[in-house]
Image: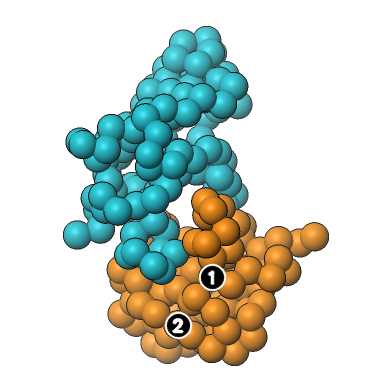
Amino acid sequence: NAGVTQTPKFRVLKTGQSMTLLCAQDMNHEYMYWYRQDPGMGLRLIHYSVGEGTTAKGEVPDGYNVSRLKKQNFLLGLESAAPSQTSVYFCASSYPRERAYTEAFFGQGTRLTVV
Amino acid sequence: GEDVEQSLFLSVREGDSSVINCTYTDSSSTYLYWYKQEPGAGLQLLTYIFSNMDMKQDQRLTVLLNKKDKHLSLRIADTQTGDSAIYFCAENYGGATNKLIFGTGTLLAVQP
């Protein structure tokens, strides 16, 4: 059981380049999330999805796009990378709220540097 | 707003108790959570508390909830060097959607 898998684990981009971060979960979870982690700012929610084919904006969505074409995958895209997007990105998934408390399962993170 | 606030750093000696504090914003949150992040890893759920409870104990962990003040705390008894990590509190924000909002994280450093 792999849980939540993120690819790639590390990436260096030049300003203006584009890339896609892939998140895959094998737990049949409905909800998936993308967060970024920056020193002193904790985790901030970028986008999330409550099911296949749905996406919604989080706290800091600007400069990012997402897609959830398959239930198990949640893609995060950067169309034109900026140095301010240098961060560690975490994907997470969870059951819907109706299944009692929410335990979010996290991937290992993607460390992205934009130069 | 959606601010969940924590102090950034806590240093304790091995064997002492640690208390990590958090203030949250959404009074309608049904559950509140503590997550642990070890170096170079993702977050893992440590414990949680239902909003109609004041306290929950789980081995060395004690969670206290003050709903009136929107204050959550995590006490770790007999703190060990293996407890060194970043601790995040989190709340479900937004009613029906299951949007988890995390605090800024507290780095716990345990001195031998």
Left or right position of B49 against A27: left
Q: Which residue type carries mark 2?
A: Thr
The picture places residue B31, in percent across and down from the top left corner, at 42, 47
Badge 2: how crowded within 10 Å, few (<14), some, or many (20+)? some
For the point 66% across and 77% down, the residue is A72
In-front residue for pair B83/B3: B3
Under circle 2, the secondary element is loop
Mark 2 to mark 1: distance in Å?
9 Å
For the point 59% across and 22% down, the residue is B59
Callout 1: residue from which chain? Answer: A
Mark 2 vs mark 1: which is more N-terminal?
1
Q: Which chain is orange?
A: A
Instruction: Judge whether B89 appears above or below B3 on screen.
Output: above
For the point 30% across and 53% down, the residue is B28
* Residue pointed to by mark 1: A32
Left or right position of B59 against A28: left
Total numbered circles = 2
Chosen colour scheme = by chain
Give the label on residue A55, or none: 2
Give the label on residue B7, or none: none
The picture places residue A79, in percent across and down from the top left corner, at 42, 89
Q: Which chain is cyan?
A: B
